[in-house]
Amino acid sequence: MDIDSIVLFRSLDGIYSDFAEFTLRDTTGLSPYIIRNITGVDADEIVPRFSGVGGSSGNKFFNMRLKPRQIAISLILNPNYSIGNTPSTLRDRIYSLISSYKTSKIALGFYKEDVEVAQIYGFISKIESDLNTLMPEVKITFYCEDPYFRRSQRISVNTDSMSKTSPVISDYASSAPHGFRMAITATAPFNTYRIRKTVDFDWSFTVNFAFNTNDTLYFSSEENDRYVYVNRPSISQTYNLISNIEIGSEWPIIFPGDNTFNVNTALYNYEYIQYYPTYWGI
């Protein structure tokens, strides 16, 4: 991932607002905070988690997961004395980040030529100051329960010409696997929606439900926000389908590159397919 700046955001009244930008290629020295070092942005402590067994191969499936991440940024304090700034005032501003709203969350944004590449959210867990030096520094440690770097906005897949029975979702931006959101609307009644691996059908995700024409199925396999439900507009009714998921189903995810799936029916139209580009590290 190629970046040239990091932006630190804090929450003000529930809305993220930029606090400081750390330019990685700054040669002017005009910034009040100059980044000296950053650690904790690699893919560290990857743990396999068993998720199931392949139906035809018998292979054990594992989801590779990162442990919570700690990012430490060392900053040189560079006050502009002509406007009344001192190392103390710059430190106090950083201390104010610890909890600026009830959520106490901060965000780190990673940019390339002012275009966002990814973000990560967390809490400030430690602030360390070096007072006995001619070049005062502050080290900020962030604790990120969700360790993945993601774009802050989902990407929408172009479904205009996408196959309904053999859809291919391509993701050449991400370096890590991730879930996705999807909505489809039935064009005729059917009783089962099944998405599975193409070729040997080694895994499948099956929802058994009597879908009517114009029913819209909403689905998400995003790890922290999984759901399956149907909206039936004819009677303004919503049905939660978590209990309708067939035993042994595997949530479908997107891996970097081309992902070809098999779907058991073509009696639907796409409403949308969306996902966050996701990265193991910077």
Image: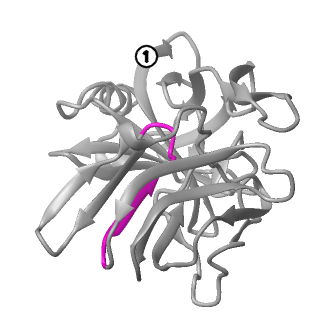
Left or right, residue 129 beside residue 255: left
Q: x and y percent of residue 105 in the render?
A: 33, 33
Q: Any magenta on residue 48?
A: no
Start-end of magenta stretch: 214-224
- Give the residue furthest to the bottom: 161
Residue type (three-letter) at the residue carrying disc 1: Ser
Asked whether the viewer can see residue 276, the reply is no
In the rendered view, tell whether residue 260 sits above or below residue 239. below
Q: Secondary structure at mark 1?
A: strand
Left or right, residue 199 beside residue 9: right
Asked where in the image residue 39 lies, by quadrant, the reply is top right
Q: x and y percent of residue 138 in the render?
A: 51, 23
Q: Circle 1 is placed at which residue position? A: 125
In the rendered view, tell whether residue 280 sits above or below residue 7. above
Asked where in the image residue 251 lies, by quadrant, the reply is top right
Foreground residue among 241 and 272: 241
Residue in the picture at 69% in, 21% down: 49
Foreground residue among 229 and 106: 229
Give the quarter of the figure containing the C terminus. top right
Left or right, residue 101 beside residue 185: left
Q: x and y percent of residue 95 in the render?
A: 32, 24
Q: Any magenta on residue 219?
A: yes
